[in-house]
Image (spheres, rainbow, N blue to C red):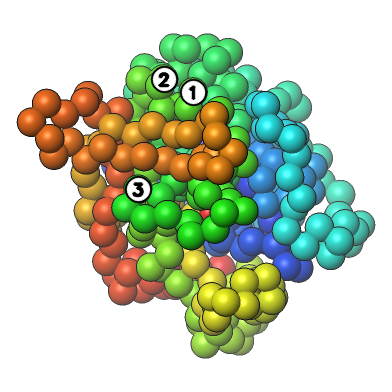
């Protein structure tokens, strides 16, 4: 069975010191034979949306898939002020070094509504950035909630916290918690992969060296970006002694084809949008009480990290 996909992303791969996992997720979905990527929509998150759009176009070109349309999405969260993008000073001029490629016309929310509602029950949205575009699409056309096949989201933390007062919620949720609340209350079929499982799937420097050594158009470039990102993580979070790069977003892509990579549990999830102290914290009721609340999603609670990294690298090495 072919999975028809929209990838909603805050891709930043290529901007030194910015997160790389969206770029790897894009590469994986392009290469997995039972996934058909039909639309990429970009959103403000890891980097500003215009740079993300330019990088998305550049990466699809490097992957040999310039035919896949990229539509620019939200430049800012629904309500929250714009946040400082990681390593902003180092990425300011990244677009100057890219061949200018044009995105498809229009805006992400309408492109999502049009594709999902024209193909009821057919389209899966894989959301790997803040949920601003997905929320706007659901607000623009509530029928998206019943027309979409499902929405798979890299976001949240359900069995743990971030242990950071500066960002109490997982990044994608923390950036736009109001958008996450709209999605959680939309009635759409939702599956979440939170930090509980995504921090267990990691790319190490030896993997990055092997990628670089391939000399392949994407893999060698991605290997260099991986080293730069691990360097950035070590500098930005010295107390966490990073020596790998978590592959948050590629796991969300992988479970489209291999849902058994993780253990799923039904849950009732709510998100904090009032207090700044707990902004973006996702609270998951795992329905263990005598009168549990109605579930509104599935959350991943465990992952086979060895099986994932083998699946992931086997695809990416050849790109
Ligand atoms: O918390 C991890 C998420 O935030 C990933 O999607 C990463 O790309 C960043 O957007
Ligand atoms: Ca992302």
Chain-order first, disc 1 or disc 3: 3
Q: In the figure, 145 relative to 177: above or below?
A: above
The N terminus: image quadrant: top left
Residue nearest the observer in this picture, 43 or 84: 84
Q: Residues within 10 Å of mark 2 (few under 14, many from 20)?
A: some
Q: Residue at x 74, y 35 (%)?
A: 81
Closer to us: mark 1 or mark 3? Answer: 3
- Left or right of residue 47: residue 299: left
Q: How many marks?
A: 3
Vertical comparison of 254 with 156: above or below: below
Residue 293 on image: x %, y %: 21, 26
User: Residue 158's mark?
Assistant: 3
Q: Disc 1 vs disc 2: Cβ atoms closer than 8 Å?
A: yes
Residue marked by disc 1: 182
Circle 3: element type: loop
The numbered disc on residue 193 is none
Residue, x 76% and y 68% (percent of image)? 16
Give the alpha-carbon distance from disc 1 to disc 3, as whole Å: 18 Å
Answer yes or no: disc 2 within 8 Å of ligand 1. Answer: no
* Extreme residue in the left direction: 290
Residue 121: image location, x then y, percent: 35, 23
């Amino acid at each position: 069975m072919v999975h028809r996909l929209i990838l909603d992303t805050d891709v930043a791969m290529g901007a030194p010191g910015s997160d790389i996992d969206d770029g790897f997720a894009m590469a994986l979905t392009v290469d997995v034979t039972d996934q058909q990527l039909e639309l990429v929509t970009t959103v403000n998150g890891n980097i500003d949306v215009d740079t993300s759009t330019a990088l998305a176009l550049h990466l699809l070109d490097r992957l040999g898939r310039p035919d896949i349309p990229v539509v620019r999405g939200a430049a800012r969260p629904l309500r929250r002020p714009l946040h400082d993008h990681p390593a902003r000073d180092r990425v300011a001029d990244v677009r100057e070094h890219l061949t200018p490629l044009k995105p498809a016309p229009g805006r992400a929310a309408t492109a999502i509504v049009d594709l999902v509602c024209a193909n009821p029950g057919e389209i899966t949205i894989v959301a790997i950035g803040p949920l601003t575009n997905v929320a706007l699409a659901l607000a623009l056309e509530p029928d998206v909630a019943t027309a979409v096949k499902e929405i798979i989201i890299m976001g949240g933390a359900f069995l743990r916290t971030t242990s950071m007062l500066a960002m109490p919620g997982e990044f994608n949720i923390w950036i736009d918690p109001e958008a996450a609340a709209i999605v959680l209350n939309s009635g759409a079929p939702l599956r979440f992969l939170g930090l509980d499982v995504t921090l267990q799937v990691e790319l190490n420097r030896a993997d990055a060296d092997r990628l670089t050594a391939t000399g392949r158009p994407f893999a060698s470039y991605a290997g260099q970006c991986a080293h730069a990102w691990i360097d950035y993580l070590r500098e930005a979070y010295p107390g966490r002694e990073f020596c790998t790069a978590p592959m948050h977003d590629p796991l969300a892509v992988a479970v489209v084809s291999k849902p058994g990579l993780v253990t799923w549990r039904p849950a009732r999830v709510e998100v904090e949008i009032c207090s700044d102290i707990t902004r973006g914290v996702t609270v998951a009721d795992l329905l263990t009480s005598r009168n549990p609340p109605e579930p509104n999603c599935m959350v991943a609670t465990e992952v086979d990290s060895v099986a994932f990294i083998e699946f992931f690298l086997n695809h990416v090495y050849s790109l």
